[in-house]
């Protein structure tokens, strides 16, 4: 195969689908390789992304900022065997508190002009098999993390 394309797949299987601050995400990463692969590591990451849109000099700009990144190595540098392998994981979620909404008309205007960024955050799990000199095999999954 060319540079790792279509050489295998990853899947993320969770014990639950909704999470709150301080809870633990428990699950497993399922790795399915068509042939044995030397890899630097297999890891899973949890993070939030805040998308910001603004106008600058008449042009629309979009940026994505990562917040609350956590990474967990599931296995190290080695030759991963062909076939299906499963790697359990547990990630404790951060304790995050959302800003209390302001009261009254002034509060509504304030919330409109300066919304709490955590309420606009999308949360993800990303499993990655890091392959040298090739495209990594990865799986990104959005999770329901309610602050």
Image (tube, rainbow, N blue to C red):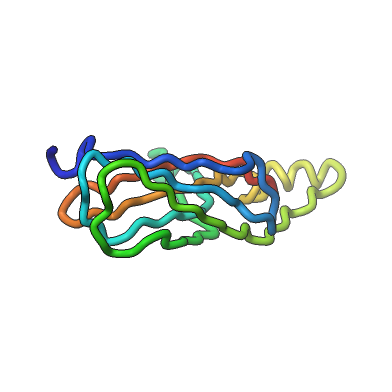
Find residue 83 and report its horizontal and vertical position in percent: 30, 41
Residue under the image location 66 percent in, 41 percent down: 18
Asked if residue 45 lies left or right of residue 104, the reply is left
Residue 108 point in image, percent of width and height: 78, 42
Which of the two residues, 35 or 104, is positioned nearer the viewer here?
35
Q: Is residue 63 above or below residue 38?
A: above
The quarter of the image holding the N terminus is top left
| Residue at far left of view | 2
Residues 111 and 96: in front is: 96
- What residue appears at the point 51 percent right and 46 percent down from the top-left corner? 124
Quarter-of-image position of residue 94: bottom right
Viewer can see residue 124: yes
Question: Residue sitting at 40 percent across and 57 percent down?
Answer: 43
> Is 24 positioned to the left or the right of 56 in the image?
right
Total numbered labels placed on residues in the image: 0
Q: Is residue 61 visible?
A: no
71 versus 34 height, above or below = below
Residue located farthest toward the top when viewing the structure as drawn: 6
């Amino acid at each position: 195969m060319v540079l790792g394309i279509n050489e295998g797949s990853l899947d993320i299987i969770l014990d639950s689908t909704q999470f709150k601050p301080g809870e633990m995400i428990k699950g497993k990463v399922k790795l399915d390789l068509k042939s044995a692969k030397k890899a630097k590591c297999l890891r899973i990451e949890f993070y939030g992304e805040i998308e910001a849109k603004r106008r600058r000099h008449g042009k629309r700009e979009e940026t994505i900022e990562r917040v609350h990144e956590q990474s967990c190595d599931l296995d190290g540098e080695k030759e991963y065997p062909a076939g299906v392998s499963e790697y359990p994981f547990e990630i404790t979620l951060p304790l995050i508190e959302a800003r209390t909404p302001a009261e009254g008309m002034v509060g509504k205007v304030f919330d409109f002009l300066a919304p709490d960024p955590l309420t606009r955050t999308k949360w993800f799990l990303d499993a990655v098999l890091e392959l040298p000199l090739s495209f990594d095999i990865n799986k990104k999954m959005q999770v329901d993390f309610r602050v």
